[in-house]
Image (cartoon, rainbow, N blue to C red):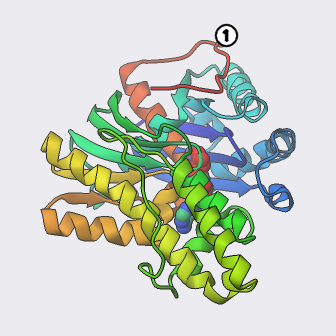
Amino acid sequence: MPIILGIESSCDDTSAAVLQNDRILSNVIASQKVHEQYGGVVPELASRAHQQNIIPVIDAAISNAGIDKKDISAVAFTRGPGLLGSLLVGVSFAKSFSQALNIPLIDVNHLQAHVLSHFIKENDDSVVPQFPFLCLLVSGGHTQIVLLRDYFDMEIIGNTIDDAAGEAIDKAAKIMELGYPGGPIIDRLAKEGDPLKFKFATPNIKGYDYSFSGIKTSFLYFLRDNLVDNPNFIQENINDLCASIQHCIVSFLLKKLHKAMKDTGVKQVAIAGGVSANSYLRTQLTEMGRKNKWDVFVPKFQFCTDNAAMVAIAGYHKYLKGDFADLSLPPYTRGGY
Ligand code: KG4
Ligand code: ZN
């Protein structure tokens, strides 16, 4: 029954988690409020905050799990992609920890970890996907449709050619001066709005690929034009604007996912990444799954945005294969899979 400590520090969340086999024992996340006043993540501030948070977060994960650090079988860490300064904190800590305890070190790709978060079990009744399945990975940095044939046999069959979906939502929120990160704010306000009130065109992109930069620009121009006639246009229509832009982005995400499901003939579908916390995406996908008789896997909220439990589950499956890292491995800022 291996016990894996997972460490995540790729962006602005410091997280540590403990898993016994694939069962979660603890998952501690320290989010960094410092970035809100700047409207986005400031890399240098993020790495400094990781340095402050990492030891208390790991201590809490170990004690919440009810274990001693000597019980840990291996330490898994996010090697990339992410911000270099942020990654270095987790990578250096993981290396020192594995050396001090003389336990194996496991490097994990952040994107694979998001997708594999579906295999974290909370109890004996937890249902996990069967291979093959498709996963829509939607975060602040990525928008991909991934075909999983096995834990580490993942093929990216669709990708964004410019902005990520989360980035587009955050930018729409910024244009309306709603604060950062905009995704959860738009999600909340959209609940009171009409998703069909305003229409924004989605681009024609081949295959299962996405593009979000045009949607963002058309949203900007739409507001600019309406503000000429009515300077209070945003305040007076805020709920409808949030619901409509959210509907536009979510419908586009699901249209391509639907096409990929039909073409591949796969019957199980999952979502992962920060944007998978979006309530409209979750209900629309669940409804689409019901109509098409697909099994739909929607992650628990704590496993949507960045967390170390997903790093630990990816680490666990690498542990079973004996796929360990050596101390010379540097972090990487881009790429993966
Ligand atoms: O996966 P994540 O925590 O970090 C990255 O790896 O990028 O994703 C962060 C993204 C942000 O763009 C944030 O606005 C978005 O996830 N997000 C949401 C919601 N919660 C987080 N977007 C829409 N609705 C939400 N409820
Ligand atoms: Zn992420």
The residue sitting at 38% across, 40% down in the picture is 209
- Number of disc labels: 1
The residue sitting at 15% across, 48% down in the picture is 262
**Residue 9: x percent and y percent?**
68, 40
Residue type, numbered disc 1 = Ser
Q: Is residue 231 left or right of residue 144?
A: right
Looking at the rendering, the quadrant in which ligand 2 lies is top right
With respect to residue 289, does 336 lie above or below? above
Q: Is residue 68 left or right of residue 313?
A: right
**Residue 70: x percent and y percent?**
63, 34
The residue sitting at 82% across, 45% down in the picture is 42
Q: In the rendered view of the protein, which quadrant contains the C terminus?
A: top left
- Does residue 66 appear in this view? no
With respect to residue 260, does 87 lie above or below? above
**Residue 236: x percent and y percent?**
66, 89
Q: In the rendered view of the protein, which quadrant contains the N terminus?
A: top left
Can you identify the residue that label 1 sits on? 328
Quick one: label 1, few (<14), some, or many (20+) residues within 10 Å? few
- Does residue 53 appear in this view? yes
Q: Quadrant of residue 105?
A: top right
Q: Nearer the viewer, residue 266 or 247?
A: 247
Q: Is residue 220 left or right of residue 290?
A: right
Q: Quadrant of residue 74?
A: top right
Which secondary structure, mark 1?
A: loop
Q: Is the CB of the residue bearing disc 1 within 8 angstroms of ligand 2?
A: no
**Residue 14: x percent and y percent?**
71, 47
Q: Is residue 242 left or right of residue 297?
A: right
The residue sitting at 73% across, 49% down in the picture is 57
